[in-house]
Image (cartoon, rainbow, N blue to C red):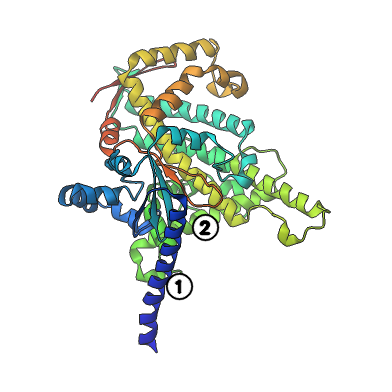
């Protein structure tokens, strides 16, 4: 009986994959678009992990014919840039990748991409319950926290890198960790309502740690009781080791004893700690009547308002017909996804902007002139700047960050859209990894005079 079960399970799995694959092929045929058959869906975590290794991309590029390498690389977002336009020339500007896990639509035509991005009613962005969380009040919170964190980061740079003989001129060899910390702290405040200082300032926990929410999220010396990480520590670890955390908690069977995989011990602990921290925040937001504009508070408030509206609805609909809003798990998942998506991409965009400003110092001068013109001369505390009065007048920074940095060096390879179903559809070619690394390896000579920062590429 045991042997029969062991043989039957793989056969059932293969049969299920085959049925799904044939179903997706039939869907692709109905579109009348060119399509490519591929065995693995690009969102498969094990497939993504294979491209995280050094040997597999090297093997594809050095040991296989170009057409085979293109066929494999074009099937996953992490390596699609290496194909350039060869597949688009062969199959046209719009073609499908059909796999058992889903159908991806690769778009290599600029006009089509423009149409997809602008036709919001035809190509829907899946926001649904989340749209009310994003508004000017939330943007103002991001603005205020960004000013606070940037000021603290500059003070930290001056303290750490300047010398007694040259306090206002110093070189920073690597901005990666500092920029990542900057974006993480901003998102912790705007996303979760947790304010962290840029320079760690560990504090002692009070004896009432189990009941004090504020103490739980202190920048503490040691983690709270029954936790392995502090909140800052778990956020940093999750963002640094996302793939291994997903493998440990998303791929491995839940029934598998954890002692069998001791190398995932820290990943299990990080996942558990983050869940507990975020659940505390959701519970706190649920009972908080104060007006707060962080993302978590606004999503929870939107859910509460929607549930109250559903209870007061006298239209005769059954409870099954109503949409009670997001569950706790969906709230936590969405807020964390926003944090992951915003943290890494924001940090990378800022680093590219620093590189471009250092290489194009004439643009840097124009940027400085506009900021000087907009900001008041007697400004002493940047955090006092009003978002609604100041931000609309800063056109040049918007051009540098959005229309230049993001145009030249895209930080995201995918655009999440849906038509009448939830299947992902499109991708754009990202910057080649070799050029990205070449740019980000530059160090900077930074000159500060009062509030002035001047960047110059030094390597």
Q: Residue, x 49% and y 34% (percent of image)? A: 115
Indicate the quadrant containing the C terminus: top left, top right, bottom left or bottom right: top left
Label 1, label 2: how far apart the Cα atoms are: 26 Å
Q: Earlier in the sequence, mark 1 or mark 2?
A: 2
Q: Residue, x 62% and y 22% (percent of image)? A: 388
Residue 430 lies, in percent from the top left, at: 35, 38
Q: Mark 1 — residue?
A: 255
User: What label does residue 247 carry, if any?
Assistant: none
Answer left or right for 229 relative to 126. left
Answer left or right for 318 relative to 381. right
SS label for mark 2: loop
Does residue 48 show up? Answer: yes
Residue 302 lies, in percent from the top left, at: 68, 45
Q: Mark 2 — residue?
A: 225
Tell me if mark 2 has few (under 14), some (14-19) or many (20+) residues whose alpha carbon lies within 10 angstroms of its own. Answer: few
Q: Residue, x 55% and y 49% (percent of image)? A: 334
Between 449 and 202, the one nearer to me in the picture: 449
The residue most toward the bottom is 1
User: Height in image: 391 above or below 80?
Assistant: above
Q: Residue, x 46% and y 47% (percent of image)? A: 425
């Amino acid at each position: 009986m045991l042997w029969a079960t062991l043989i039957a399970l793989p056969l059932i799995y293969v049969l299920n994959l085959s049925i799904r694959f044939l179903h997706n092929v039939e869907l692709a045929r109905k579109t009348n678009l060119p399509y490519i058959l591929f065995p693995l869906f690009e969102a498969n975590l094990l497939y993504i992990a294979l491209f995280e290794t050094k040997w597999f991309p090297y093997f594809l590029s050095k040991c296989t014919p170009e057409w085979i390498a293109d066929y494999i690389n074009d099937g996953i977002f992490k390596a699609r840039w290496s194909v350039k336009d060869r597949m688009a020339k062969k199959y046209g500007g719009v073609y499908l990748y059909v796999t058992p896990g889903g159908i991806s639509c690769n778009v290599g035509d600029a006009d089509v991409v423009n149409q997809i991005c602008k036709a919001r009613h035809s190509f829907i962005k899946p926001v649904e319950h989340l749209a009310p969380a994003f508004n000017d009040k939330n943007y103002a919170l991001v603005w205020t926290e960004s000013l606070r964190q940037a000021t603290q980061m500059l003070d930290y740079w001056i303290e750490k890198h300047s010398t007694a003989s040259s306090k206002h001129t110093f070189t920073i060899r690597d901005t990666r960790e500092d920029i990542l910390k900057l974006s993480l702290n901003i998102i912790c405040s705007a996303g979760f309502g947790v304010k962290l200082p840029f320079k760690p300032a560990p504090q002692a926990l009070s004896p009432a740690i189990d009941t004090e929410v504020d103490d739980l999220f202190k920048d503490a010396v040691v983690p709270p009781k029954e936790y392995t990480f502090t909140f800052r520590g778990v956020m940093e670890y999750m963002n640094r080791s996302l793939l291994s955390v997903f493998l440990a908690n998303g791929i491995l069977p839940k029934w598998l004893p954890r002692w069998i995989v001791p190398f995932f011990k820290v990943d299990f602990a990080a996942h558990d700690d983050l869940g507990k921290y975020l659940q505390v925040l959701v519970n706190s937001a649920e009972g908080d009547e104060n007006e707060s504009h962080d993302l978590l508070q606004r999503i929870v408030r939107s859910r509460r308002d929607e549930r109250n509206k559903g209870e007061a609805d006298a239209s005769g609909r059954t409870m099954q017909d109503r949409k009670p809003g997001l569950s706790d798990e969906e709230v936590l998942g969405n807020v964390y996804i926003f944090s992951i998506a915003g943290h890494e991409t924001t940090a990378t965009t800022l680093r590219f902007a620093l590189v471009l400003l250092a290489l194009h110092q004439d643009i840097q001068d124009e940027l400085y002139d506009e900021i000087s013109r907009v900001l008041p001369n007697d400004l002493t505390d940047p955090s006092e700047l009003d978002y609604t009065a100041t931000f609309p007048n800063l056109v040049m920074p918007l051009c540098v960050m959005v229309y230049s940095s993001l145009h030249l060096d895209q930080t995201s390879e995918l655009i999440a859209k849906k038509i009448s179903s939830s299947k992902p559809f499109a991708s754009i070619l990202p910057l080649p990894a070799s050029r990205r690394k070449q740019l980000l390896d530059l160090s900077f000579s930074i000159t500060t005079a009062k509030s002035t920062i001047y960047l110059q590429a030094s390597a």
